[in-house]
Image (cartoon, rainbow, N blue to C red):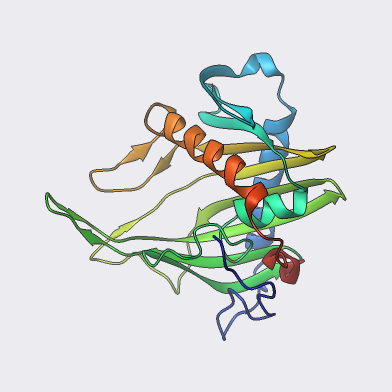
Amino acid sequence: MEGFSKDFGTGYGFSDGSQFSSNPTFSHEIDKVLRQVQELHDLDENEWSMRTYKKQYNVPAWKGSYNKERNVMRIKGGVKAPLEKVLTYILEPPYGVRNQGKVEASNRIIEKIGSGAVLFYHEGQGKVLCCCRIAPRDGVFIAGLKLLTTDTAIFAMKTVDHPSYPPKEDGYRVNAPLIGLFVQQEGDVTNVESFLAEMDLGGKFGKVGPGKALGQAVQQMVYLARDIPRQQDVAPPYRQLL
């Protein structure tokens, strides 16, 4: 992620035709999914069963756990960086810069739902490998970021239906009921809780739950915790959405 501009500009991540939504359903849905992330954060620790644990030199430990009743996995750990920097590099566009350089997928804002909340279209390109072809996948997501205090933030997103973006015949529509973060800075470490409910990627990938994804997700967070403190300080893209 080295080399990103320090000023992403007010148009970063926005489609030219984006507008504020007049549909109260989307506002209700984003409030609902944000509350779900808060509820997951508030659960007693004994309601999570630990499945995996990873530690690298000079990086706080990360662990993956699972709540069977809600069918949600949690990845929990710390990053030695300020909250603003963690959010910038842990969130994908339009909120952050994670995976910004990838050409395999794109996010385009359809509507601005309100302060910190958007409706966007995600499109992942298909791939042709030596052994098989991976079909393209897409989805319409609502997402919202709230700064609860100067050192605490909550982020949530989920897929929704939108009449202007029906499923494509040559690909698969992703179904993701909940993806969330609860982020809180304590001293020089920002603690991160990442939540993921079982999602359906369609096709041969099918449903992705804790058995398939938890170990890989924990490893990815360990890499991020190692790399984020090394990255340059940039103007957080999410600021333009608040």
Nearest the camera: 204 or 89? 89
What is the residue that sits farthest to the left in this orientation? 131
Q: Is residue 229 above or below residue 72?
A: below
Residue at (69%, 18%) from the top-left corner? 45
Residue 42 left/right relative to 217: right
Nearest the camera: 201 or 160? 201
Q: Quadrant of the N terminus?
A: bottom right
Q: Is residue 153 above or below residue 77?
A: below
Residue 123 left/right relative to 61: left
Residue 22 left/right relative to 14: right
Report x, y in % for residue 224.
57, 44
Q: Is residue 48 above or below residue 129?
A: above
Report x, y in % for residue 100.
51, 64
Q: Quadrant of the C terminus?
A: bottom right
> Residue 5's image quarter?
bottom right
Residue at (63%, 66%) from the top-left corner? 118
Report x, y in % for residue 68.
52, 21
What is the residue that sits farthest to the bottom in this orientation? 16
Residue at (35%, 47%) from the top-left corner? 201
Residue 22 left/right relative to 187: left
Count of numbered circles in the view: 0
